Amino acid sequence: MTRRNNATIPILALAGLLFMIPVTSRAGDRQFRAIVQRIQTHYQKRPMRFMGLLSFVANRVRPEGIRNIKLAVFEDLDSSRHPADSDLDALMQKIVGPEFQPFVRVRSRRDGEQTFVYAKELGRDFELLVVSLERDEACVVKMKVDPEEMEKWIDDPPGMSKKSAGGPGHGAAR
Amino acid sequence: MKNLIKAETFIGALLVLVMGASAPAFGQNPRLKINNLEKLSSKAAEVIDVTLDGSLLKLASKFISPEEGEDEAEVKELIKDLKGIYVKSFEFDKEGEYSEADVESIRTQLSAPAWSRIVGVRSKDDKENAEVYLMTEGEAKNILGLAIITAEPKELTVVNIVGPIDLEKLGALEGKMGIPRMNLEKEKASQKPAASHDEKK
């Protein structure tokens, strides 16, 4: 029994550690990782710590119709380093590639927010890649949505992208 | 031999002509190049860009359930054969941020013979201008696409719908899929023949 306990402790510790590793290092999606990497390099900032844990929690309390959430949040970004709108557009398109189709782009100078949403068909479901850039924050979210949830997005693309800019929970909270 | 070459050249030219004629009005495209307006982004307070085509549009028309309201069913019926919906909308903080030339860059793509303006409403007081263009093909006047331009002093919106669309039900799309509310029903009521474009209120 004692030997069994001894084996369980390292496994639990390892599992705990895995959740603490920023999600970017575990994310399987090339585009998600590429965008996070790009933001990291451009602003010389790392994503917030415990993103793995946050993603885990987000996946547990996720709204219906959304799953496989991966997110990375950047704080205290230097707004003077924000790329020009046209550069950002082209850059995003280059990173996501033809696999994802551009779906919505909302840019509000008043709020200092830009949100890009790209979509990819995944069998019956869709994969959404939401990149939101604020004055001093950035958020990258990748999530799998079922057709019913996707319908909400199609019905009101600007509204849903504005809502989801703060994270996947906002998007479906209707 | 010379005659043979002449005959081949003639047949070739004929083929090109026939193929050209069968394409929608000599290569005119129901999909507009609205990226021309991208330069306005830097001046705009808000920009909305919606691209709805391919699998996304298919999905939108796929799930027609009997529980859904009449309006929803109507929308899905309306979009089931569409190929794409593209919306670009700019909101400015002050007047004069876009020029007539910017709007003209879209209008030039909407020229005859393929495109015709079916609605043109211009309000003198509010300086609002709304135009609806239709692209048709052949004797049967099959609808290939539709374009809506609404220009207000502080707002400019271009909607481009590619594919056959029922004009009578067009209003059902307002406020959906990124298409702003444009009082299309009202404008349709004031529809005039293409010759008398502008209607002063």
Image (cartoon, coloured by chain):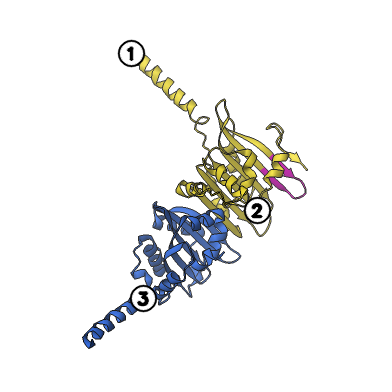
Closer to the camera, A35 or A53? A53
- What quarter of the picture does the N terminus of chain A occupy? bottom left
The percent position of residue A82, horizontal first and vertical second, equals 49, 66
Identify the amino acid type marked 3: Phe
> Considering only vertical position in the picture, is B155 above or below A74?
above
The number of discs equals 3
- Given this view, does label 3 or label 2 mark the residue nearer the observer? 3
* Chain containing the residue with disc 3: A
Closer to the camera, B30 or A87? B30
Q: Are marks 1 and 3 in contact (CB under 8 Å)?
A: no
Q: Are marks 1 and 3 on the same chain?
A: no
Q: Which residue is mark 3?
A: A19
Q: Which residue is mark 2?
A: B155
- Given this view, does label 2 or label 1 mark the residue nearer the observer? 2
The percent position of residue A100, horizontal first and vertical second, equals 42, 54
Residue positioned most to the bottom: A2
Residue A41 placement, left or right of A117: left
Identify the amino acid type marked 2: Glu
Chain in blue, by letter, is A
CA–CA distance in space, label 2 to label 1: 61 Å
Identify the amino acid type marked 1: Leu
Residue A163 placement, left or right of A121: right
Mark 1 crowdedness (10 Å alpha carbons): few <14, some 14-19, many ≥20: few
Residue at x 50% of width, y 69% of height: A80
* Badge number at residue B4: 1
Q: Which residues are magenta?
A: B120-130
CA–CA distance in space, label 1 to label 3: 77 Å
Chain in yellow, by letter, is B
Residue at x 55% of width, y 64% of height: A163
Q: Are marks 3 and 2 in contact (CB under 8 Å)?
A: no
* Chain containing the residue with disc 2: B
Residue at x 41% of width, y 53% of height: A124
